[in-house]
Structure formats: C-alpha cells, structure tokens
Image: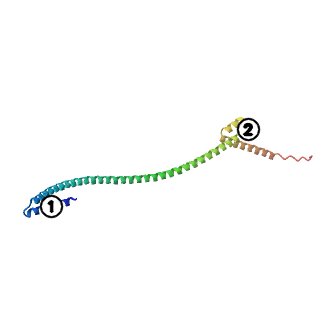
Amino acid sequence: MSIASIVRRSAGVSSLVLALALAGGCSTSDRSRVEQASQDNVALKAQVTDLTQERDNLKKELEVVTKSRDQYQEQVTQANKATSEMQSKVADWRKDNDTKEIGLKSELSKAKAELDAAKKAQEAAEQTAIKLKAAEDAVTASRAKAAEAERAAATASDRVTQLTAETAALRQKLDAMTAELAKKPAAPPDLNK
C-alpha cells in the first residue's frame, strides 16, 4: 500500500469519526468506535511516519547506488576507451610487425641468394686454384731450373710475368735465327739423289 493511499484512508477515517462525533449524541458503542478509530488513526499516522522515513532512507540508498552505478559506468566507459586504444595500438603494432617481417624475409632471401652465389664463387675459386696448382706443377716440371720453378710457383702473377718475359725472349731468338737463316744463301739442291 502506498503512502498516499494510507494518508487518504486515515483522513477518511478521521472525517468519519468527526462526523459521528458531531452528529449528536454518541452512544457507548459509538464512543468505543470513535476511540478505536482514533487509535487506528494514530497507528496509521505512525505507519505513515515509519514509511516516510523508510522512503527517505531508500531514496538515500538509491542516491548512493545511483552514484556508484554512475562511477562504475564511467569506469566501464574509460575501460572500453582504453581497450579500444589498446586494440588500435595492437593493430598498428601488428601492421608494423608484418611490414618489418616482410622486409626481413626479403633481406633473408637476398642474403640466402648472396650466400649461394658466394658458395658457388668459392667452389669456382677452389676449382680454379686446383687448376692453377696443376698448371703450376706442369710448368715447374717442364722447367729446367728448380729455382725459377719455385719462384714461379710462389705467386701466380710473378709466374705470368716471368712466362711473358721468357716468351718475349724466345720470340727474339726465333726472330734472330730466322733473320740469320734469311741471310744465308739457300743450299743448292743435292742432285745425286
């Protein structure tokens, strides 16, 4: 029952009691009814007072709960905002990480290709070194002088220079011999054959 209906009821009872009292002579039963109605009226007023106080207390509690709810809603809003910002940062980080990962994969592929090329170049250099060693050994075996062979084997560039110089000297001798042969008259053919 609401406070307003209790107040209306007590006001109605009070009016009834007052009307009976004014109506004239009251009998004992009427008086007892009036007294009972008066006691009921006092009890109802006390109930109204208690209910009003309880209502005021409930209003205060409602205000406290509403304030707490508003604080929680603000915290939830801030938490949602922070979560949104964090998700945005995570998305940016992932995008940056993916970009870096693509770059690193590209660099790794390039490095692997360079490593493969270097391995092939090393293998080719080893084969060339083997061939050069074999060539040096062949040149050393073909030379009469051991000292010249050791110097030629010491460095490939010295050997090339030396071979070039020797080739030039041999050409000069050949040219000299060819010139001497050109100066000598040709021997007459042997007719006795």
Q: Is residue 114 above or below residue 13?
A: above
Query: Where is residue 143 shown, x and y percent of the image?
Result: 73, 38
Please, what is the three-letter code of the amino acid marked with disc 1?
Val
Which residue, as the protein is rendered here, is positioned at the far right? Answer: 192
Mark 1 residue element: helix
Please, what is the three-letter code of the amino acid marked with disc 2?
Ala
Front one among 102 and 128: 102
- Please identify the quadrant where the N terminus is shown: bottom left
Q: How crowded is mark 1: few (under 14 residues within 10 Å), some or many (20 or more)?
A: some
> Marks 2 and 1: in contact by CB < 8 Å?
no
Count of residue discs: 2
Identify the residue shown where x is 13% and y is 57%: 36
Q: Residue 13 carries which label?
A: 1
Horizontally, residue 146 falls left or right of residue 22, namely right
Front one among 10 and 136: 10
Which residue, as the protein is rendered here, is positioned at the far left? Answer: 25
Query: Where is residue 140 shown, x and y percent of the image?
Result: 71, 38
What residue did someone put label 2 on?
A: 141
